[in-house]
Each structure stands twice: as C-alpha cells, then as structure tokens.
Amino acid sequence: MRIGFTSLNFKTITGHAGRTNRFLVFDLAEDGTATELDRLDLPPEMSMHEFHQAGPHPLDALDVLVTKECGAEFITRMAGRGVRVVMSPEDTDPASVLKGIAEGRVNVSGAGAHDCACGHDHHDHDHDHHHGHEHGHGGCCGQHGHGHGHGRRHGSPAAGAGGA
C-alpha cells in the first residue's frame, strides 16, 4: 500500500493539506514493513488548492494520504482521484501512524469519506444533534466544521436531550 503524508518539514505530519506541496511517500508491505519511497517537493501550483486540471497529479499514485487537518472539499477531491484521506490531528509521527495502520489500529479500509488516526470513534454523515442546527461531520476530535465540539460521543443518550 502506498501511503503519503503531508509534511512541510519532511519529518512530521503537518496540516493545511490542500495547500501543502511537500509529501513523504512510503510503501507499507503486508508484513508491516514501511519503506520510504520518495519526498515530493512540488511547485506551489501543484498543491491541490491550486491544481484544477483533470490530468494526472503525483498524488494519484497514493492509496492513502495522511494529514493533520483538511477540509471536506479536499477529502472529496482526493476521493475523486482514488486516494483515501486519513486525518491524524494528535499523532504527527509518520512512523507511529504507519505502525498503527499495520497493526489495524488506524482504519484505511475505505468505509467512510475519511478516517482519523487519533483512535476516537468518528463517523461520517449529516444529521441533527437536536441542539438547534444541523451540521456535516468531516472534522476530527471536536472539530465539526462549525466551530464547536459537543463534549460527548455521538449517539450517546445525552445527544438527544436538547442541550449543548
């Protein structure tokens, strides 16, 4: 499996995935062995924020892209290119995330629009939390894309109690 990481410093997982033009690329073998394949240092116009062409892009070769943070549009664009996005807001060490993928602790199976390497229970869909507004999920660890977290797991009995 070919796994890329957004990494402006070529050491840690960094955010702003759509504007990033530097990536670490690894091959993760079935036995869990990770081998660094490449360090992409793309010109600014090749960041996904700037790249609006239908043609090939160097990130198309990835199966999974791990980033610290990104927006829903980035996830959708990458999915359209066949690349699964995994957010890792807490663990910024590529070796640690690679180990988590190899051990099955980080889901890269493709079940939702994205996954999170933080170990928390997340799900992707739009629904009403019964507190006065609707919102779409896609953020991570309390970042629901509308500026506040709920302080409880989704689906808990308190979620429909009308608070928050």
Image (cartoon, rainbow, N blue to C red):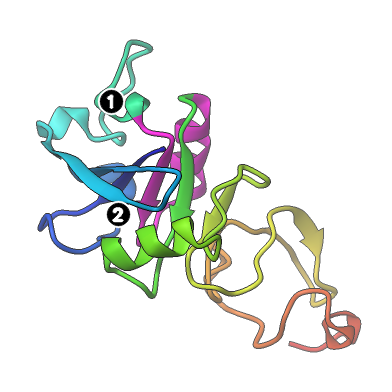
Question: What kind of residue is marked 1?
Answer: Phe
Q: In the figure, residue 42 lies in which quadrant? A: top left
Residue at the disc numbered 2: 16
What x and y, as percent, mark residue 72?
51, 47
Per the rendering, the mark at residue 22 is none
Calculate the distance from the C-alpha at mark 1 to the C-alpha at mark 2.
15 Å
| 70 horizontally vs 22: left or right | right
Residue at the disc numbered 1: 51
- Closer to the N terminus: mark 1 or mark 2? 2
First to last magenta residue range: 62-80
SS for callout 2:
loop
Toward the viewer: 32 or 8? 32
Q: Is residue 42 above or below residue 17?
A: above
Image point 85% across, 88% down: which residue? 158
Mark 2 Cα within 10 Å, few/some/many (few <14, many 20+)?
A: some
Q: In the figure, residue 113 lies in which quadrant? A: top right
SS for callout 1:
loop
